[in-house]
Amino acid sequence: MKPIITVAFIALLSSHCFAQNLIKASPERMEERIKALSQFGANPEGGVSRVAYSDADIAGRQYVMGLMKNAGLEVSIDKAGNIIGKRKGKNNNLPAIAFGSHIDSVPGGGNYDGDVGSLGAIECIELMNENNIVTEHPLEVFIFQNEEGGLVGSEAISGILTEEELSLVSSSGKTLRQGMIDIGGDPTRFREAARKKGDFKAFLELHIEQGGFLDREGINIGVVEGIVGIKQWMVTFTGKANHAGTTPMDQRQDAMLAAAKFVVETNRIARSIEGRQVATNGKINALPGAPNVIPGKVEMTLEIRDLDFEKILAVFDKIELAAKTIEKETGVAISYSDLNEDIPAMTDKRIQNLIAASAKNLGLTHKFMPSGAGHDTQDMARIAPTGMIFVPSKDGISHSPKEFTSPQDMANGASVLLQTILKLDKAKF
Amino acid sequence: MKPIITVAFIALLSSHCFAQNLIKASPERMEERIKALSQFGANPEGGVSRVAYSDADIAGRQYVMGLMKNAGLEVSIDKAGNIIGKRKGKNNNLPAIAFGSHIDSVPGGGNYDGDVGSLGAIECIELMNENNIVTEHPLEVFIFQNEEGGLVGSEAISGILTEEELSLVSSSGKTLRQGMIDIGGDPTRFREAARKKGDFKAFLELHIEQGGFLDREGINIGVVEGIVGIKQWMVTFTGKANHAGTTPMDQRQDAMLAAAKFVVETNRIARSIEGRQVATNGKINALPGAPNVIPGKVEMTLEIRDLDFEKILAVFDKIELAAKTIEKETGVAISYSDLNEDIPAMTDKRIQNLIAASAKNLGLTHKFMPSGAGHDTQDMARIAPTGMIFVPSKDGISHSPKEFTSPQDMANGASVLLQTILKLDKAKF
């Protein structure tokens, strides 16, 4: 035990030593701006509905662009509708260091998802202004459009947004095409927003965890190892619809019973394997869907997430095997169709280490962890080395008016973001 | 073993002896009329959608009224819209013997449910005409309106239809009120259709089984002991909606998992108890209902049926007890609200025996059994002794275009109905 205690003691000592000399973000300024931004789309029960392209979103973007301009950034809207704020470096031939997040919300969302990273990015610019810091590399602050509706803005920047997607209807009721027009983009020229490999030295995103690990364990900073891959299936259970009064229990081919057994097995298997994989059945429809008819058909979603795509497939294989037994027990056929697939997006190991070192230097505790949620960073990883910084979400609650991150935690995140930018500016890669 | 063989032999012998002298219904005429009636609301894939109050229903009623008039019945429509065909007896001061069924169908229904009993009742009148039979008691043939939409016609006759129910919207899209007008009733005077205890010596209904007992066991006639009671609940599972990516498996309060365990337990308990009870979960809704969100709330129906209402409550008690364990395992609260309750309606033992004797005399096999489905007879049981005759449904399929009963089985049912009417006419009760 002795060596461990010694190391811990030295680590504590060293972080305290460094901590005193570093620039710290302002919890008061972060909180004041979070409160101001929360007025746009505020709901009576708390939180916001600031879905992309809504009036609230458009007004919120104006507010944020005002902050960016006041902080001296050269602000523009790209053809896809993303807000970009540029700050010159000492050597503007170097690739830019980019960072930012989004300010759109889900319907009935909270005040922190995306907002902390957006305002945290602006906070870094304020701190550099206040401390007369000019980086070697030019800087770009990104406020991505419509993150919640499918990472639309970062898809455009990474060049994977398609013409067809523009016809999708977003939570606002507008198509992406119309929405893009309403926020100052140009859907006929959205491809011009695409950036290429080499344009950025790195992309960084500060974000709330949206899970409960940091809060539960009392850790200040999450160093994101990567964004989990997601695979979704529609699972169809085909039995035989029949009269619920005249069909004896042993004569049924009850699709609801088969689906129920499938949910129980999905849960059991996801828990029985070592690791951090998660499996969820979120949506279900039983047909014909009457209290007095045995369901002949059930359609239900299955979603599996893990940082390792092979692990996702291995979990699915076990579920599929268990389903064969359910088919025999119930006389119900079970089939699968692919719904959606996002491959895992790993962050850059070197940047992970810079984030961890920054946290340490600031006297903050940290933990390496996956992101269970999707983020714009996963698109940016297609064209740049990336890093992601998590701060705690109270009780792990997100996409809810109850979402909460303390002013100090927000400031801690912004402080780590600044230190990471400064370290990256000097790093040789 | 010897006595049993002897009894069986004598039974066989005696039924053959009687069988030769009795009037038999015509399989050809039954089949011809079933085919003719099936034209009204015919679906391309077979079967009919002849929902009450639709144009198809109104046209089908015209066809049936034509048959009734041609058979010499005095046809009228009561204030609730039921079709009534009267035939005088020798002593018209005696209470009437009533019999009949319905001709409306579920959407996407078959050609036999209700129709066999309606045309079978008319067949009995034809046979009496052909054989110059005049009963002591007057006879009344009933074609009840809107059986499938909640036994509306027989509720009116038994005096339990309420003013509020008239505002309910039926499968046709019309309110019961409007529907009643369209079929020749008068919703402002529907209470005048109510009949009272003593008006009928008995009510009899011939119907397809809608289950698979008779077909599977090769038995000709089901003597219905009663119509099962039904109790339905809405079961609400309240957990915590959360992000399907960021919430570890052991931190979830997954309402879908709790509902799934509940379905598995419902099935296990209903099967584990001796008897013919059935329990069904037919309808489910998971909220918010997205593939990437752990459901925070699930609403699901539970229905239990049995001929003994105490048995229904005992099955529910066991399910409720099992649900308490599920609550502990999942952290999800489970609550119940009553949806619907129909008490069991027993048929008259004396009439059961007359039906059994009639089948035997006709050389037909029979079996005493419950009806798992609801029927107009259960309302008629409020004001008269009742009896119900079942004929086989191929593979037990009902409420489907695949519904099928053979011409001979239909004729067998009508023959038993006629013999039962004739026996009742002479019976001293």
Image (cartoon, coloured by chain):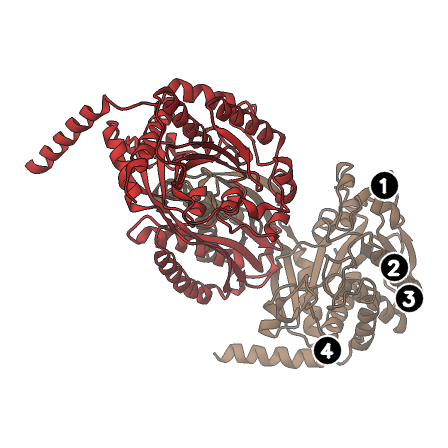
Chain colours: A red, B brown
Looking at the image, can residue B137 be seen? no
Of callouts 2 and 4, which one flags the residue occurring earlier in the amino acid sequence?
A: 4
Q: Nearer the viewer, mark 2 or mark 4?
A: 2
> Label for residue B71?
3
> Label for residue B18?
4
Of callouts 4 and 1, which one flags the residue occurring earlier in the amino acid sequence?
A: 4
Q: Which residue is mark 1?
A: B187
Chain ID, mark 3: B
Helix or strand or loop: what does disc 4 sit on?
helix
Of callouts 2 and 1, which one flags the residue occurring earlier in the amino acid sequence?
A: 2
Q: Residues within 10 Å of mark 1 (few under 14, many from 20)?
A: some
Give above or below for A119 relative to B42: above
Q: Give the spatial CA distance, label 2 vs label 3.
A: 19 Å
Foreground pick, A315 / B256: A315
Q: Nearer the viewer, mark 2 or mark 3?
A: 2
> Label for residue B59?
2
Q: Give the spatial CA distance, label 1 vs label 3.
A: 29 Å
- Marks 4 & 1 on one chain: yes
Looking at the image, can residue B58 be seen? yes
Q: From the viewer's perspective, is A78 left or right of A208? A: right
Q: Give the spatial CA distance, label 2 vs label 1.
A: 21 Å
Q: Residues within 10 Å of mark 3 (few under 14, many from 20)?
A: many
